[in-house]
Structures are given as structure tokens and as C-alpha cells.
Image (cartoon, coloured by chain):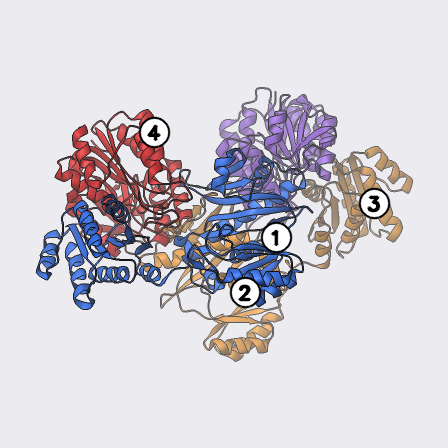
Chain colours: A purple, B red, C orange, D blue
Amino acid sequence: MAVLVDKDTRVLIQGITGSQGTFHSNAMLEYGTKIVAGVTPGKGGESVNGIPVYDSVKNAKEAEDATASVIFVPAPFAGDAALEAITNDLNPVVLITEHIPVRDEMIVVHAAKAKGITVIGPNTPGIITPGAKQKLGIMPGHVFSEGVVGLMSRSGTLTYEIAAGMTNAEVGISTAIGLGGDPCVGLTAVEAVELFKQDPETKALVLVGEIGGDAEERAAAYIKNEYDLPVVGFIAGRTAPPGKRMGHAGAIISGSSGTADAKIKAMNAAGIQVAEKPSDVARILNELL
Amino acid sequence: MAVLVDKDTRVLIQGITGSQGTFHSNAMLEYGTKIVAGVTPGKGGESVNGIPVYDSVKNAKEAEDATASVIFVPAPFAGDAALEAITNDLNPVVLITEHIPVRDEMIVVHAAKAKGITVIGPNTPGIITPGAKQKLGIMPGHVFSEGVVGLMSRSGTLTYEIAAGMTNAEVGISTAIGLGGDPCVGLTAVEAVELFKQDPETKALVLVGEIGGDAEERAAAYIKNEYDLPVVGFIAGRTAPPGKRMGHAGAIISGSSGTADAKIKAMNAAGIQVAEKPSDVARILNELL
Amino acid sequence: MKLFEHEAKEIFRAFGMPTPPGGVARTSEEAKKRAEEVGKPVVVKAQVLSGKRGKAGGVKFADTPDDAARHAEEILAMRINDLPVEAVLIEEKLDIQQEIYVGVTVDRNARKYVMIGSSAGGMSIEELAEESPELIIKHHVDPFLGFRAFEARNMAIAMGFKGKNINRLGSFFIKLWQIVTKYDVELSEINPLILTKDGRFLAADARLNIDDNALYRHKDIIENLHREPAEMNERELKATAEGMAYVELDGDIACICNGAGLTMATLDAVALYGGQASTFLDLGGGSDKERVEKGIEIALQYDKVKAILVNIMGGITRCDDVANGIVAVRDDQGIDVPLVIRMVGTNEKEGQDILTKAGIPFLKTMEEAAAKVVELVKEVK
Amino acid sequence: MKLFEHEAKEIFRAFGMPTPPGGVARTSEEAKKRAEEVGKPVVVKAQVLSGKRGKAGGVKFADTPDDAARHAEEILAMRINDLPVEAVLIEEKLDIQQEIYVGVTVDRNARKYVMIGSSAGGMSIEELAEESPELIIKHHVDPFLGFRAFEARNMAIAMGFKGKNINRLGSFFIKLWQIVTKYDVELSEINPLILTKDGRFLAADARLNIDDNALYRHKDIIENLHREPAEMNERELKATAEGMAYVELDGDIACICNGAGLTMATLDAVALYGGQASTFLDLGGGSDKERVEKGIEIALQYDKVKAILVNIMGGITRCDDVANGIVAVRDDQGIDVPLVIRMVGTNEKEGQDILTKAGIPFLKTMEEAAAKVVELVKEVK
């Protein structure tokens, strides 16, 4: 009924005693997320929002049987926190933190790959499975309603915009995954499509992309060959000039590569309908489903 | 009929144009070793002792189908040369070079392990299989005669001394392996015993150890549980004082560990007869076989 | 953070990479002196953080120190890509046998560094990829083992070099890798790396971008540079200091939103209805009243702005905070351009009440808002 | 290469590890001055490259600068483990809450670095391993990923620390690891690392050995030390310069052989026949005439030597070269102690002919040779 996160996921929050960790662990709890433990080195024995805090992931996992981690640790320490989660076999590892050095990201991604662990992000709003009332991240839960559409996106608020549109149009979501706005992220769009393909409850996909890189082109190529259910696309940054970083570290047209045009062309070639405006996504889905 | 090296081994010499590489590749050829190529970056197209020289292991392997490598590259570059051999799937990789930084050795050993490749050495005389007339190393071939005894040792000339004694006593050798005199080496004594155990032609073993570390104790424990054929031991350094490096980087008694006494005790406990003098090894073997 | 050519070359030399003899000049007199020191024909190169300076006339050859001074004077008076040229680099003009490309960047898909080399340097790697992709040699660096000397030599071999040149060229790759790991480089290029007629390899140009996110690990570099990390105008500096993403564009509508994707989509929607954005301003997540005020203030300082579109999708960001920020700016200093607001999500109702009370209209969808702001800007013009 | 405590601490401090206030003194006047600077009771510690200086009387406490001067004078006059004490370190005497052990070394079996920690510092790690092995916490470092901050914290947790002390103690492990990777350390210990009564962690002692084989990568360290890499006597220096392995022992028979294992076995054989070696001298592989000459010359300079046993297993080393070397030393400068030679292998016949011609006897087995040299030494005595 979902990918990566379901009702059995037992969540650990790394950096829970920080302002972000405290605020969002509370929001997650309110939404319904099964948070079983928090970690802040040196603050073991405390509690945050009623969640017990441990000094290490090892201790937290042993005591509370956590299965997944959400990381709010500041950028200089976030890579280390992710490796700690990976070493302790938490899966998925959701790396909310922004501004992590790319070299740290690469090490984290490959350490996770070597162990078969999925890293979501960094610089992601996280992942949400409305049907299980589990959100591992910072998204406003109420804009996502339960349903059969898998949603993946490189951006946060744009995803909320589209999800809210879907909810208004009564098109629900199986799982929504924020892939992250950095150039190097763990879970790629292609891998996300693969996961949704294996989920029998997901009947259609929404792929929200943006300028920079060619993750969307790769996903489109994969979809063309491997994915038979309807897919709707949206690309942000169609009017962005080359050479400028549009907020996200990954959203930049380098030379002539990474343009919205190229992505839309690739999507169209794969039979993906690309929405012109965010509000079109729900409309097209309603036509297709 | 042997371990690691047999008549099908096709040998590459890294560092062949250096004085050591040139001298020993000639000695190896004279002994009968199938040397198919040499490598010295920048000297591709030359030849040494009639052996074609290539600029890279990749080129040499593609052209001459080499399967194993012997490395004579100077210490600062030897780690890199070993990684080049490992990357190109040569196996075994015989690392003759002495004085390689231990950090480089550790990387080489683990890179090889990850690919299932055997590294012999560093700081080893190499490996010789008299029955196949193949020696990958710097040992004088004539002191080793063909036979059924597997020989492994941490030292060079002491091995020749013992092998010469065996040859005089008409006790032959299946394969003799120099494990290397450094604290960190690739193939360990335990792993060497495992290899000999799988060789149906090897009917007895000689384990020549020396002070420092506990490789001999570990091999003895393994032999006690897993190896049923006769084993003769010899330990050098019974009169060495603690805290002094006896020539080999690995030959040092640290505190109270690594003493000859401890090793001899462990060997005796494993049913291994330990020779008092090098010449006793052949005598005991003759009694046992 | 982008380094100037001469700054990058200083690092290159510290790692043992040879560069042509020469030095930096900030006046034509200095340029003359540098050329005299070189004592041979020189090249005078604009120091700007922008490619294509050659096409803009920022690179000139000079046979004599007087010529060098003249060229320097011209170039120092130029603006390239809207940036002033504050220095030139005077270097010996090399006797070229071959132009080579050596570079390193991050491959997003592989999530690895990729070393790139080509025997056909001089042109941009993008052009080369289109014209002669077979001449581009790539090596993805193992994230755990790093880049090894033999891999550097293999690149030189694959690029067609022989004999001693294998090690000589290979060493540039190795040193480049050392710089990458020491300084968290995200992109570096030596283009061209020159092989001279007398057989020397020299880094004739240098590009070096350090990962902004890793700058905290490299304070020493910034200190040595004696300058700001990036060339930014006053508004960009302010926005950056506030942690906002701010990009100036050629249109006239400032889009102030929360979230990079939403801001880009808002720019696109403006274009869809026939308008053109002047400003990409992502306030970031969880913006409070003060932040919204600051954002609008910065946007208003850009003289191209003729209208403002605020588009907020409330998540962590609360609509009442945003509304209070907007009202505060209007009351405190006035907003003298048309203002269109769209605001949904967390505390939407409260936010709308605040706007209504303050007499500021708002819309419910971003499409309506985009259409409206385009209409208003047309009226202003 | 072993560093002195004060040298190791200088590196520790450069990486941000706190050490007790104090400084080095080479005279009692300097010691007084250092103690005055500290302004509190101090400890005066002999700077020698040897453990167990405490038991040898090389560590003394002083309440006043005058006491410190007196202790320093005594200690500077000592020899510890046969090495002169050329300097003392004067440091504040700490108010100890807990003594901790923090160290790193190479695990031969795992072929990995191993970080070691214990809440029970102060005694040697060998003693601790025997007395309270359960108090020793070990972590093998992944050769590709290195040692991570969370692993350092996990060590501190496993050592029983809580709260802020987890990060405080963890940072010593992290910094130690940074030093290991920067300087190719093969062994380092902070023993004890002191937790003071007022809650500070300080490296009270420091041991730091750099991998000799990697010294070529760390010329900067050696330059900063302004001393020879190791404390060696004249003969050891000469042998090391020649690339020979040379160790002095308490006996009277110099064993000159080729190969470390063979040399050790020769020492053992001498002992087996009732003798005692004075010298371990491994000529190394491929020794030529000059090398053999140099080896015998160095051996003869050690005043304990009463006889020489040359034992050569010719492989790369040729017996004729060895024979020529022996003859040359005898003819040029004379060998005034009994000389026993055993020589087999490559060019054995030629070598034996040379010795025979020169009137020097030789034997065929090392056992015969060992027995013979022991017999001769007894006659000399």
C-alpha cells in the first residue's frame, strides 16, 4: 500500500533536541508518525515531546527497536549522523538537512548503497505515506490525502502546492517522496519509479522535476521502457536563465544541459503528460484515472 | 599439485625496467617462470630480457593475458602498483618491495580482500612452485626441489636455509610461500594453511615463524582444529630481547606479547613438532613422512 | 565559491603544478612592470568570474611591455558579463604544441567525482562533447579508495600520450585530485593545459570552484584571498546574509515565495500569462514576520521591479506571519508598486483576516495571482 | 620514529587537544623559570624515548620552583634505559578526578588501525589487558571509511562516560585519528588522559610513533624537530645509513648474516651451543664486497665483541663477494678477534676458494659454525 514507509515503520529522530528536531518531531507525532526514539549525543536520558532521547543511534535502536531515521542535525555534522544511521542499519534514512558538503553526501550515498539502504535527500522535505498516517519529514501532513498516486519531487512547497491541488480534486497519494534539492541525493527519480512499480497499490505517478542535471530525463527513459501506468510530469524553471542557481543547489542550467525544455521533451517522448501549471497536475490525473 | 601458482600462471612484472626488476625477471626466466609482460609507466614499447614492456597493467593484461603480478616498484609507489594489479584482477599479487608505509599496506590488503585477490607480502621473497618450475619472486630456485611439503615462512634466507636442508635430505616442496616480514601482510599464515589444506598433493607443512605478532599462534590454533596432516614448525628469535626490531619490521616483542616461547607453546599444543635448529626441520619431516 | 584565475593558479602552484611566468596587475603601470619581468611576449587576461571572456575581448596578446600596458588599460575599463574587470593577469605567451583539457567535477548521477581529460583542449567541454565526444576521457573516482596515480596515468594513456608524457600529464590529474580533496572543490578545469613546443606542460588557464557548503572547513583560503567569497551586488549580499535565495532577472515582476521549486514555478506562471520576472526570491522555510519584511525590502531595492507577487504555500511558514510582515512593510515605509498576494496553507484564515483588515487584497490560486500581477504591470507601464 | 613527550604534545596542541600548562627545560635554571611561569605545584618529567621512566625515578613532583629546579638537576643527570636525559618537561600538577587511556595502534591480524580506550588509565595497556580486560574498549577503523565522530562518541559511551563528557572525550579520539592520518602514525597513546576535578580533559602524557617507512611523506615534522629522527649510537647510525639492520645485545659474539630471519636463527643457534650474541647484523639482500666490509667494520667497533660469526645463505648475495669483503677487511685493517665463517649458496665454490687462498677457514653448516664460535670465545675469555 506504499513504498519505503508504512504502518510498521518505527522512527528515530537524530538531532531531536535542536529547535528543528523538537518542532518537527511534535508535528510528526500530531500527524500520527510512530516516533520511538530521539538521539542527541550528550543528552541521553532526557525526553522531547515525550520521546526518550539517547546518546547514540546504537543505544536508541537497541532500546526502542527503531527501523528508520529522520535527520535534523546541522550540516557540518549531518554526514556523520547519516553514517551512524547507516552503520546501525536504519532504513530509510531521511536526511532533511540542507547545505551538506557534496563530498560528505557522496560518501553517505555510497556507504548506504553498499548496505542496500535507501537515503532520502539530503535537502528534502521527507517522505509521507498518508494511508499509514506516517510522515518522516517536515511537510504539512494535511495537504496529502490517501490514494493511489505515487508522487516524487525535487522540491518542497511546490510538492505541497501540487498535493493540495490533488487533495482538492480528490486524487489521493500512496506515498510522496521528496527526492531533495541538492545535485547529489540518495534515492534518485529512477529508483523511486522502480519502487513505485513494485507497489501494487500505486496506480499512477507524478514526477515533479526542475532544471539542472538529467534525473528527469533518466526517469523518463526508464518509464518509457519499464513503467506501464499513467505518469504526469511537471518541470519548474522553464524561464530560468542559464548559469544561475535557482535556490536549490541542484537547480542550475550548466551550459546547455539541464534545461526544462530537454526534460519536457524527454518526458513527452516517454508518453508522460507534462502539466503547464501546478494546478494542471490534478486535472490531468483525474482524466487519466 | 600446488597452491596459488602453477604451470598456467602467466606472470606480469611491475617495475621491470628497474635494476631489481631486470635482474630478477632474468633469474625467473632462467628458472622457468612464464613471464609474459612487464610494466613501467612511460617505457611502453621497450623490452627487458626479451619481455615486452607496457605503460600500464591494463595494456599489458589486454595484450598478453597476464594472470599474476610480481611487484618490484620502489616503496613510495608500490602501494599504487599493487592497487593497479588488483584493479585489473591479477591474482596473486606478489609484493616484493620492502619499506612500504603500513597505511598503504592496509589499503592494499583490504582492496584485495574485497575482490577475493591474494596479496603475498609485502617484504616477501615471493612464492615458488618447484614442480611447475614457476617462481614469482627473488628466491634462489635451485634450493627448492619438487615434492609434497608445503612451506610457509615470514623470512627469506632462513627459508632458503631450511629448503636447502630439505633438498639435501630429499624432502621436496609443493609450494613455498614467503608471507613477508612486515607486521601487516596480505596472505596470513592461517590463510596459507587453508590453501594447502585444499591441495591434495600437499602431504605435510612447514611453518617457519619468528617473534612478533601472533600469526603463528593463530595458525597453530587453526591447525589444531582443521588440519590433520603432519606439521613441523620453526621459530626464529628465541633469544631476541623485547622492544627491539630484529631486522624485519614485524619481528619485535612488544611488552610480553610476540615471544618465541608463546609461539612454540601454541605450536606444541597444536601437535606441531618445533625444530630447535633449521637443520632439524628436514630430519623431523623425514621421520614423519 | 568561484576563484579568479590568478587565485586558482596560486593554489595550483602550491601543489606543484607549473603555470606560465607572470603576475597580476591592477593598473596599466603594473601591467607594464609585469610584462617587463616576463621579458617576452605576453598575454593580458581579464580576471573575471565568468567564462567567455575571450569572446568579450578580455584576452589580448602583447609583444612589448608598452603594448601590454595599453591592452591592460583597455581591459581594466571593460565590464564582462556585467561585472567590472578589477585586475588582469600578465603571463608569458607560450609556444604551443598542443592544447589539452584537464578537469574534475561532480557527476550527479554517479554521485561521484569524475576526472575528465581530452587531448583537444582550448574549447569548452560542452562544445567538445558535441563536436568530438570520442576525445573526452572520463574516470569516475571511487568514493572510498579515491583517485590513484595509476588511474591518472591511464587517463594520460587514453588521451593518447606516450613515454615520459604519461607521468608528466598524469601528475596534473593527481595534483588536481589532491586539491579537490584538500579544498572540497566542486569543479576545476585547466583549459587549456599547454604542451609547449619544447615539451613542457603548463596550466595556462585555471578554474576552481569550491563547494559553498564546505567553506566552513576552509577559512584559511578565504583569509588568504583578502576579498569577499563571491562577487555580489548589495541586494544579493543582503539576501545571502539573511539566508534567502535571491536571483536578479531581466523582467519587472518580483516573485517572493517560499521554497525554490515554488518560486521557479511562480516565475514560470508569470511568463505563461505574458509577464516577465525581475526577481527570484525564495524566503526559505519557516519564515516569520521579520523575514518577510526583509525580503520585500530587498526586492524593492532593485530598480527594475514594477510589481510584486507574493506567493506563499504555508507549511512551516505561517500565513499570519507573512500577512503581518506585508502589512508592516506597507505601513512603515510604503510599497509604491502594485502588490499581488496569494497565500494558502497553515493559518490561512488568520492571514487572510489580517490582510482584509489592512485593506490588502489577496487571491486563492497562484494562476489567478500570476495573471493579476501581469495585468497590473501592464497598467503601470 | 618515536617522538619525545613534549614533541608529541606540540602536535596534539596543534590539533586542538589541551595539555597541562608548562614547558621544556634543559637546565635546572630553565626548570625553575618554567615552574614559576606555571605558578602552581608542578611535575618534572624526564624526556626519554622509553617507557617506565616513572619506575626509574624520572618523574617527580615539586611544590615550589626551587624544588622543581632541584628535581630537574637530579633527573637531567640520570640515564634511563641507558639513554641520557637531555631535557625535562615541567607541567602543572593536575587535580585528578579520573585517569583515562586513549590510544591507537595497528592491529596486525585485522590489518586495520584499532582505536583503544579505557576508563582505567595510568597503567600500561599490557598490564590493563591482564588485570581488567573488560575495561578495554576497542574499535577497528574501516580502512576505506576511516574513523567517524559517532564512533568516537560510541567509544566514550562504552567507556562509561555520560552527558557532555561523551563529546569532550570523543573529540580526543577524533583528533588522534586526524593526527594518525596526517602523519602516518603507527602508535600513539595518551596515558593518562586526565579528567580533572573541575571537569577538564587534558592529555597529561603523550606517546607518538611515526611509521619510519612513511617518513619521506613528513619531512616537515623532522625539520620542525631540529634533531635526528632517532636516538642512536654511532654504530647504529652508521648501519642505518648503510641500510643494514643492526641491534646491540649483551653477549660477546657478533653475528653478521644476510636476512633477518637467518640472523635471528643464528643468534638462537649461538645460544643453543652455550654462547651469547653481542650483535644482530643483517647485511640485507644482494650484499657486495663493500657492504660486507662495512658490516664487519661496524661490528668491530662495539667493544663487547669478542668473536665474529659470519653466516651467509647465498641467494642474491654471492659468496665470492662476501669472501672478498672478508679478506679485504682482514688485509686492510686486521681482525683482532676470532672469526668463524659459514657460507653456502650462490657462487659457494668461488667464495670458498678465495677464503682458502687467503688462509681463512670456513664451515659448511650454521650449527657447526655456531658451535665453533662459542668454543673460540671461551678460549679468548
- Answer few, some or many: residues within 10 Å of disc 3's Cα (few below 14, many 20 plus, some between 14 and 19): many
State the CA–CA distance, disc 4 to disc 2. Answer: 62 Å
Alpha carbon of mark 3 to alpha carbon of mark 4: how far?
A: 75 Å
Choose top left, top right, bottom left or bottom right for residue C168.
bottom left
| Residue D92 vertical position relative to residue C308 in the rendered view, above or below | below
**Percent of width and height locating residue D351:** 12, 56
Q: Of tags 2 and 1, which is closer to the observer?
A: 1
What's the residue type where badge 2 is placed? His
Q: Secondary structure at mark 1?
A: loop
Q: Where is mark 3, residue-wise?
A: C325
Query: Residue C28 at what x, y percent from top left?
Result: 59, 76
Q: Which mark is residue D18?
A: 1
| Position of residue D178 in the picture relative to residue C132 (left or right) | right
Which residue type carries mark 3? Gly
Q: Whole-percent x and y of residue B78?
A: 35, 50
Q: CA distance from mark 2 to mark 1?
A: 39 Å
Q: Is residue C220 above or below residue C285?
A: below
Dot label at residue B222 = 4
- For mark 2, give the secondary structure: helix
Quadrant of res A130: top right
Q: Secondary structure at mark 3?
A: helix
The residue positioned 22% from the left and 54% from the top of the image is D377
Q: Mark 4 belongs to which subunit?
A: B
Looking at the rendered image, the quarter that the N terminus of chain C falls into is bottom right
Return the x and y of residue D148 as percentages of the image width and height. 55, 42
Residue under label 2, please give it. C6
